[in-house]
Image: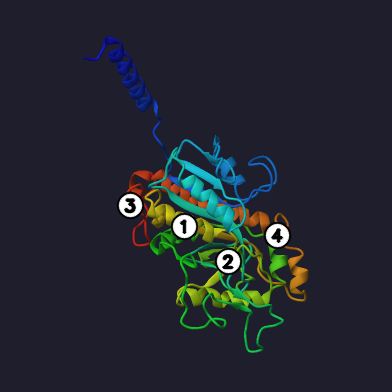
Amino acid sequence: MISPARCFFALLLLSALATTAIAKPKPIVVKVVVVAMFEVGADTGDQPGELQYWVERDHLDRVYPLSAGYHAVRMNGDGEMAVLTGQGTAHAAATIMALGLDPRFDLSHAFWLIAGIAGATPERASLGSAFWARWVVDGDLGYEIDAREMPPDWPTGYVPLRKAKPFEAPAAPLDGQAYALNEGLANWAFNLTRATPLADTDHLKEIRGNFDGIAAQRSPFVAMGDEMSSSTYWHGKLFDEWASQWVPYFTGGKGQFVTTAMEDTGTLQSLAFLDHAGRVDAHRVMVLRTVSNFDRQPRGMTAAESLSKQRIGAYSGFLPSLEAAYTVGHVVVNELLSHWSNYAVTIPSAQQPAPSKP
């Protein structure tokens, strides 16, 4: 027979457990995650990096510490979140994994917008322009011979892993080497933003006048363009030629190199793993990169001389590219949030017209 005292304590325990279960907060539903990679100083009020315009203009005033990641995440009351990964693929992968596994947030239906600045080839881009990617290709995985020791008939000293020479056929991309994004979603985002006006300046005109690339002379524009992701900051016309071959090599000719950035294969690898775990939907990921600088030297300058001028905050198109990332990206974010009842269950594609404005 159970004593009255034991019954009393058992009831107390059940009551405590029930209270704990009731008091446990539900995860915060996140609708859109803006992924930024670097900030120059504070999140607000000083020289901007990739995060600051989103924080200030979208009123991301709710701060949630992320002790297992690079930086706290920020939100507003509309379900928009911004995360700062830190530079390089390692920082990005670790921070996105920490966020994706955080029990405070429900990211199961969130759209992910990677929005950052990039270098770009002057053959296909101009300063201040914005490019939506269908492909992101890793530029780090490989063998390398110093160019001073490579065979004279090689175009580069960089060789794909498990191959004996550059661009040896058939290409055999390893897991994490080439990411095919949701093409329908990318095309939808492009169609939604293709007419977005981007500011041009006399300074941009002066800088691009020193380049001979086909697209370099154009005013800033929005287009489709694929990305090379590499934690090695390479520079120069010969590396530009290598990247222009490396991207189509690993994508079976489907991808075309336009932009070069440092973090996105790390972010995409974590999102792929989180998708396997049911934490996120990798079909809801978009990559938008805007052009802060060209990836090679201008006319009359060596690659080394040009590289010495490539510093965050001093890029020739730095502020215009930050403005373009927010201006173009915000069109998509606003559309998703304004019609969340549709997009929560349906991923938009280029075949679907955007809902009319309320």
Residue type of the residue flagged with mark 3: Thr
* Residue contact at pointers 2 and 4, CB within 8 angstroms: no
**Which residue does the image show at 45% across and 77% down from the upper left?**
252
Q: Tell me if I can see residue 328 in this picture.
A: no
Q: Residue 58's spot in the image, x, y percent? A: 54, 41
Residue type of the residue flagged with mark 2: Thr
**Which residue does the image show at 76% across and 63% down from the upper left?**
309
C-alpha separation, residue under disc 4 versus residue under disc 1: 24 Å
Q: Residue 119's spot in the image, x, y percent? A: 63, 64
Q: Which residue is mark 4?
A: 315
C-alpha separation, residue under disc 2 versus residue under disc 4: 15 Å
Q: Which residue is mark 2?
A: 259
Q: Quadrant of the C terminus?
A: top left
Q: Which one is in front, 85 or 319?
A: 85
Q: Residue 190's spot in the image, x, y percent? A: 46, 61
Q: Is residue 87 left or right of residue 20?
A: right
Q: Residues within 10 Å of mark 3 (few under 14, many from 20)?
A: few
What colour scheme governs how the chains and residues are painted in the rendered image of this protein?
rainbow
- Asked which quadrant contains residue 127, the reply is bottom right
Q: Which residue is mark 3?
A: 346
Q: Which residue is mark 1?
A: 286
Circle 2: element type: strand
